[in-house]
Amino acid sequence: MTTPAVGTATAAVAGALLALATAVVCSSATGEEDVFGAGSTAIGRHGRPPVVPAMYVFGDSLVDVGNNNFLPPPAPRSVPPNGIDLPPTVLPRTGRSTNGYNLADIVAQHLGFKMSPPAYLSLTPLSSLDLLRGQGGANYASGGSGILDITGNGTITLRKQVQLFAETKARIIRTALVDPQKLDELLAQSLFLISSGGNDFDAFDNGLPISQAPELIAGMVADYLKYINELYKLGARRLALLDIVPVGCLPSQRAITANGECDNDGNSMSQMFNALLRTEMTKAVAAFMPCLKYSVNSLYNAYSDMIANPALAGLREVKKGCCGGGKFNGEVGCTRASSLCADRDEYLFWDLVHGTQAAYRWAVLAFFYGPMRVAEPINLAQLVQEPLSMATAPYSSI
């Protein structure tokens, strides 16, 4: 019979051996060599390679750079004045649901990419060459989509986005521009960015009672983790998740409250989803994805901080949208006929639901270098092991 002390010691040794084995496996999976060969075309903004080989983006309109432009109606499309502050070299100008760069673009800038990963549906045989070498990456996001298949009429669901990445990997292997082992190394060092979930709350606008929020959110998180696990099996080892903004404070919600303040029910749903996502991610990584490094980046807290202290981010207006119509510019979407503010860099919200480029820049800066309140269990700089020198010009244009 084993004594308690011996049993405890045995368990401790077994645990240590398991941790060591996992570390060895993860180390061999990610590799330590320089993945950019002498002939690499992945040159960044400062004449040197980005800090990761590629960036793969999934999710909704917070990160979509133009996929919906290639989808037939009823998929939503961004029309002018969306993209009004983008440089003329960025095409298509109206692919983003904000006045300039969106969250995916700005993360790419921080990583040192010369260009944000292109919309997957925009790729041609020529523009696909870097992607087929495992470099640069692609953006699979679709504005209006959600975690649930029922969300987003005519959009690319998160399930389908992950399938498209699987097809991308299979195509890379078929073209043989990079061997499978090298591809695994490239994918392991790349950044996978996901922003999804906010649009799934549209179910409550379509008749679902608030009392069913816990059940809906539990299903959302379960599906989310399933798709994350699929990406892990396909080679993802560095994952950045954006949680859900305080939806009750969006101009669209302020427009329907009695006093124009934040809607508590909407914010409670965001908080419920965000808390469950963190809890279940911790469990899932320990149980099924031991080699995954991840950062949950809190759009909720970043927005809340900007609302509570606008001057912190150089903002002035944190209730009203810059472009739109009706109360708080939250009743009508941003179109050519919309009223448009002139001081866009001082607004938190671009339209009835999306942030401005200025707000996104401040949020991403927090995600890279902020404390656990905005990025946990590690921030993005720690996730990608970004050299400190990359922070010297975080906002220079792509």
Image (cartoon, rainbow, N blue to C red):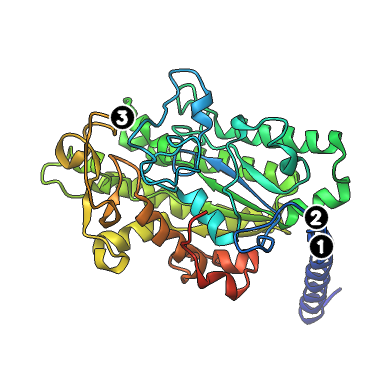
Q: Secondary structure at mark 3?
A: helix
Tell which tag, 1 or 3, sits nearer the viewer: 1
Q: CA distance from mark 2 to mark 3?
A: 44 Å
Q: Mark 1 or mark 2, which is nearer the start of the sequence?
A: 1
Q: Secondary structure at mark 1?
A: loop
The x and y percentages for residue 372 are: 48, 69
Quadrant placement of the N terminus = bottom right
The x and y percentages for residue 388 are: 58, 75
Choose between 12 and 1: the one closer to the eye: 12
Q: Marks 2 and 1: CB-CB under 8 Å?
A: yes
The x and y percentages for residue 366 are: 44, 65
* Residue 338 lies in quadrant: top left
Q: Which residue is mark 2?
A: 185
The correct choice, above or below, for 91 with respect to 30 in the image is above
**Residue at 21% in and 50% down:** 319
Amino acid type, callout 3 = Asp
Amino acid type, callout 2 = Glu
Instruction: Identify the mark at residue 31; answer none if there is no mark.
Output: 1
Q: Mark 3 or mark 1, which is nearer the start of the sequence?
A: 1
Given the current orientation, which residue lies at the most extreme bottom position?
5
Q: Residues within 10 Å of mark 3 (few under 14, many from 20)?
A: few
Q: CA distance from mark 2 to mark 1?
A: 6 Å
Amino acid type, callout 1 = Gly
* Residue 254 lies in quadrant: top left
Q: Which residue is mark 3?
A: 205
